[in-house]
């Protein structure tokens, strides 16, 4: 069993259908009674991923008496002309995805450089000990306004330059081919297979 250390339902759904997830027994941490919120107080996305993996792993051992492979992820949108903002704070600059998207668009009003990068870090912990972490990234540009209704988060304003379409306009399989999340989770899942962890 592999526990996905996220309470974000959109993220969990996206991870579960990644090609690299095929054949793995995945369970979201929210399946376990009493699942706590973990404060993400790291200064980078990688630090937050590690914090969540280790703390949920410790919690599962203490409260449920199990020591599965626990993988967490933290990701962020880095807008270059805004000096990397919102970065590690991407999920917390406003209450909703719609508000967060418009905050970025408002700050970019009048900016000629709209280049940006999605970053994702995954971290694996077992029995409360960090095993490894991995990084994925994709570069694009920020749209003038939200486009499309697929995906979640900043997908409606992040443009894939090759197709000229936002991540929210791409079908799931194409987005997965490109995405930072796919890169980071594929590396994690490949590690688990190499070490015979979490296989059905």
Image: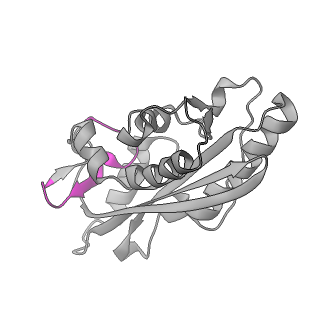
Give the percent coordinates (x, y) of residue 127. 78, 46
x 59%, y 39%: residue: 6
Query: Magenta residues: mostly which secondary structure?
Result: loop
x 43%, y 50%: residue: 186
Q: Horizontal placement of 58 versus 119: left or right?
A: right
Q: Is residue 62 visible?
A: yes
Tell me the quarter of the image containing the N terminus.
Answer: top right
Verify whether residue 154 appears in magenta: yes
Above or below 153: residue 129: below
Above or below 177: residue 152: above
Which quadrant holds residue 21? Answer: top left
The extreme left residue here reads 163
Verify whether residue 100 appears in magenta: no
Give the percent coordinates (x, y) of residue 91. 52, 50
Magenta residues (range): 149-164
Q: Which residue is more in the foreground, 30 or 96? A: 30
Report the number of discs.
Answer: 0
Q: Horizontal placement of 165 versus 200: left or right?
A: left
Q: Which residue is more in the foreground, 180 or 158? A: 180
Give the percent coordinates (x, y) of residue 124. 63, 52
């Amino acid at each position: 069993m592999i526990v996905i250390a996220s309470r974000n339902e959109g993220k969990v759904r996206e991870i579960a259908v990644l090609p690299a997830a095929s054949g793995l027994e995945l369970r979201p941490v929210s399946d376990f009674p009493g699942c706590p919120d973990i404060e993400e107080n790291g200064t980078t996305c990688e630090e937050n991923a590690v914090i969540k993996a280790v703390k949920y792993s410790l919690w599962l051992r203490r409260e449920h008496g199990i020591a599965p492979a626990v993988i967490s992820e933290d990701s962020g949108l880095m807008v270059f002309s805004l000096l990397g903002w919102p970065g590690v704070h991407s999920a917390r600059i406003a209450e909703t995805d719609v508000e967060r998207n418009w905050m970025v668009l408002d700050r970019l009003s009048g900016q000629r450089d709209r280049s940006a990068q999605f970053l994702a870090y995954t971290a694996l912990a077992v029995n409360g000990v960090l095993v490894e972490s991995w990084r994925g990234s994709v570069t694009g540009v920020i749209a003038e306004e939200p486009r499309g209704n697929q995906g979640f988060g900043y997908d409606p304003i992040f443009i894939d330059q090759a197709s000229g379409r936002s991540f929210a306009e791409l079908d799931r399989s194409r987005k997965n081919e490109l995405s930072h999340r796919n890169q980071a989770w594929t590396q994690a899942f490949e590690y688990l297979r190499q070490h015979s962890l979490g296989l059905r």
